[in-house]
Amino acid sequence: MKRVLVVEDDSHNALLFRKLLERRGGFHVTVTESAPEVVEHVRSHTVDLVIMDVSLANTTWEGRPVNGIDLCQMLKGDPATADVPIVLATAHAMRGDAESFVQQSGADGYVSKPILDHTAFVTQIQSLLREAA
């Protein structure tokens, strides 16, 4: 069973991600907004893919506030964690945002919230996991 880490600070979005990924995708899902937990999960290879909220209002790393872009850059910049696929998720989905966020962060994909097409979302995650295998 593939393991997905959802990094999300909104409990409603976290619950939606969990339900979609567990029920439709058959994944094991862990949810957190703690930067140290994210880094530990990815470094210890206890997850196969990360879905990362871009905003992360209450997340800190070593005493300073960080967002999903910052965390993604950290993980993608570390050779020990760079191969774990990361999908950015945000409600700030204006034209051009997807490309800008992915380019800036080094992420492997992007999804806008709210998730409207549940099947397409799960298919996107399954595809990224197949590519990473």
Image (spheres, rainbow, N blue to C red):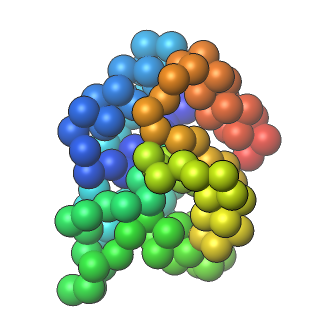
28 sits to left or right of 76: left
Vertical order, 40 against 91 (above or below): below
124 sits to left or right of 115: right
Please say whether residue 4 is visible from this viewpoint. Answer: yes
Q: Nearer the viewer, residue 76 or 133?
A: 76
Q: Residue furthest bottom?
A: 63
Determine the residue positioned at 66% across, 52% down. 95
Q: Nearer the viewer, residue 7 or 42?
A: 7
Q: Residue furthest front?
A: 95
The percent coordinates of residue 125 (x first, y second) are 62, 34
The percent coordinates of residue 43 (x first, y second) are 48, 65
Determine the residue positioned at 73% across, 46% down. 132
The percent coordinates of residue 99 (x first, y second) are 71, 59
The percent coordinates of residue 101 (x first, y second) are 61, 64
For the C terminus, give its image quadrant.
top right
Residue 39 falls in image quadrant: bottom left
Vertical order, 35 against 121 (above or below): below
Q: Nearer the viewer, residue 21 or 115?
A: 115
Vertical order, 9 against 22 (above or below): below
Residue 30 falls in image quadrant: top left
Q: Residue furthest right?
A: 131
